[in-house]
Image: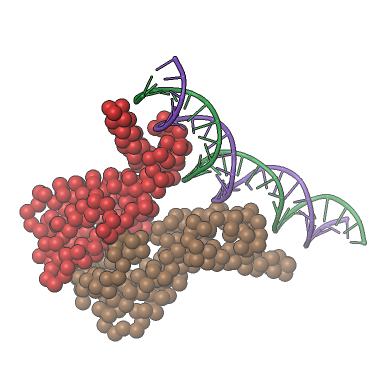
Chain colours: A red, B brown, C purple, D green
Amino acid sequence: MSVQERRRRERAERERLIVATARELAEHQGWDAVTTRRLAERIEYSQPVLYSHFRGKREIIGAVALDGAAEMAAELRAATAGPDTPRARVAALAHAYLDYAARHPAVYDAMFELDGGLAFADEDTPQPLKDAFAALLETLRDVAGEGVPPGLFTEVFWAALHGLATLTRAGRLPPGDTDPRVELLVDRLARM
Amino acid sequence: MSVQERRRRERAERERLIVATARELAEHQGWDAVTTRRLAERIEYSQPVLYSHFRGKREIIGAVALDGAAEMAAELRAATAGPDTPRARVAALAHAYLDYAARHPAVYDAMFELDGGLAFADEDTPQPLKDAFAALLETLRDVAGEGVPPGLFTEVFWAALHGLATLTRAGRLPPGDTDPRVELLVDRLARM
DNA sequence: CCCGAACCTTAGCACTGCTAGACAATCGAG
DNA sequence: CTCGATTGTCTAGCAGTGCTAAGGTTCGGG
């Protein structure tokens, strides 16, 4: 009985190892470098072992995404804990969001650009994703303005941040100038 | 001499055929279905012929992106030609943008999500891309507000639209509700 | 001590983007 | 009109991808 326990623990441990290794590989060399062969080699098991934990590469991406969502939510909450005024909290939130996207591009992609097989905006949406959205909403609800549903406002604000994050990183927007862009966004969208 | 002329024309014609076929395939079955083998079969030539026109698949994506940029710019200009007030023009612009993204997801991806090997926000940026940005700027410059550079304003507005377009299509935002989102965006960002 | 089951690996499939080398058709010069 | 050279195209193949069927090997439970 306790043997089965131990095995279960070891399996869970190995699963964490897979996800952590995938993330590390992706952060250092990009998702293209995350092949099942390389990943298997890094964890020192053969390829089929990966498929005993995940249905396929897509699910591994999904696992990294959940990991990142929890981490991002925590960072967003930490950033908005300090400032006193709603305006300052929103600005801090925006900067923290863009900062995370810039510092962890691979994880950001797993969450919002790649297909990790996760449900979004749905009752089946995994908790970490719901929670990350909640972290945005907690701060943004205070500046939605009269007659504007907080959820709707959060969606629009989030979309704007997402657009800035992805277009900037892909080189579609000139780098630098992030600060004035965020300032404009916050000044115009937020209603105190 | 005229023989070489004819050949040159036929080559150019075949190049257009390649791009058109790639686009059609992508629009109907997604970019994953656009493989060099399938593409070669569709144009009734062997694979290496593709490589005598383009350096690789990436450049083919880039060609589709340029095609789409010209088309999109035209649609944006057509949409903003009608309305009389700046407010209405901006709203029409936003809807036309999101409409194009929704109607031509594959082309939109070629322009803004995939790597087509194109330069952006640079002097080397191909004309169609510059022109598409210009189409946005022409309408948005009138509502940037005092002291805000039109270029900066356009970047932010564009990023918001891009975020809405991609998050909606990827299922990250609940479908429907597009109208109130656009209304909120226009009402808050634009200054008359 | 031995059996059965859980576990892991080897080997392979069908596919990808891309390319070297062989082949045929066409052109220009004599 | 003929012959060599140049173009153009295709066949065949490489290295790599995600994924899986089949076969051992190992190890706990009786």
- Quarter where residue B156 is shown: bottom left
Instruction: Work out whether residue B129 can be spotted.
Output: no
Q: Position of residue C17 (x, y in %)?
A: 54, 50
Could you tell me which residue is drawn at 13 percent across and 68 percent down? Answer: A145
Name the outermost residue toward the left: A84
Q: Nearer the viewer, residue B73 or B138?
A: B73
Q: Position of residue A34 (x, y in %)?
A: 42, 41
Quarter of the figure with the C terminus of chain A = bottom left
Could you tell me which residue is drawn at 66 percent across and 60 percent down? Answer: B45
Left or right: C9 in relation to B147: right
Q: Nearer the viewer, residue C3 or A71?
A: C3
Quarter of the figure with the N terminus of chain A = top left
Q: Number of callouts in the render?
A: 0
- Quarter where residue B165 is shown: bottom left
Could you tell me which residue is drawn at 28 percent across and 76 percent down? Answer: B91
Could you tell me which residue is drawn at 31 percent across and 35 percent down? Answer: A12
Instruction: Work out whether residue B101 can be spotted.
Output: yes
- Judge whether B98 appears above or below A135 on screen: below
Left or right: A164 in relation to D13: left
Q: Position of residue D2 (x, y in %)?
A: 91, 56
- Quarter where residue B108 is shown: bottom left
- Judge whether A76 appears above or below B89 on screen: above
Q: Position of residue B85 (x, y in %)?
A: 26, 82
